[in-house]
Image: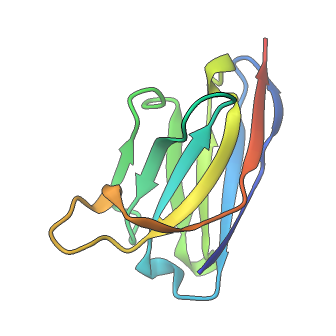
Amino acid sequence: VQLQASGGGLVQDGGSLRLSCAASGRTFSNYVIGWFRQAPGKEREFVAAINWSGGMTYYADSVKGRFTIFRDNARNTGYLQMNSLNGEDTAVYYCAAAIPRLGSTWYTGPFTYWGQGTQVTVSS
């Protein structure tokens, strides 16, 4: 599956953005979709994941209550709604897709397919 992330930009502290992850090539609904981010000088970190049906979600503690992950399988697109943004959310955001291994926790991947990243910058 090929993934393309979009929707990043410059937003003021406290503002909102919605990222999109458009998929093509294979059956989108087969995959867990995850969002990750990498800030300058830091390692990439997990942000959120959603299972194939959209019925289960999982968030990093740092974004819980502010970010919402959802998907539209009919449109082959995943989304990350980000509210109450602050400077610590500044990063390149990546979407990724995974088919969980049997017996593993569904949101742990492995995330095999990655989009190209979209920059989110929060200004104070």
Residue 14, image quadrant? top right
Residue at figure coordinates x 54%, y 62% from the top left: 96
Q: Residue furthest bottom?
A: 26
Q: Position of residue 20 (x, y in %)?
A: 68, 57
Residue 8, image quadrant? top right
Position of 30 relative to 93 (above/below): below
Position of 96 relative to 38 (above/below): below
- In the picture, which quadrant includes the C terminus? top right
**Closer to the camera in the image, 85 or 34:** 34
Q: Position of residue 64 (x, y in %)?
A: 42, 31
Q: Residue furthest left?
A: 103
Q: Is residue 23 left or right of residue 32?
A: right
Q: Is residue 87 left or right of residue 103?
A: right
Q: Residue furthest top?
A: 124
Q: How is the image coloured?
A: rainbow
Residue at figure coordinates x 42%, y 58% from the top left: 50
Q: Is residue 32 left or right of residue 26?
A: left
Q: Residue furthest front?
A: 41
Residue at figure coordinates x 54%, y 76% from the top left: 73
Q: Position of residue 75 (x, y in %)?
A: 64, 76
Position of 42 relative to 93 (above/below): above
Residue at figure coordinates x 63%, y 88% from the top left: 25
Q: Position of residue 56 (x, y in %)?
A: 32, 57
Counting labels gives 0
- In the picture, which quadrant includes the N terminus? bottom right
Q: Is residue 83 left or right of residue 106?
A: right
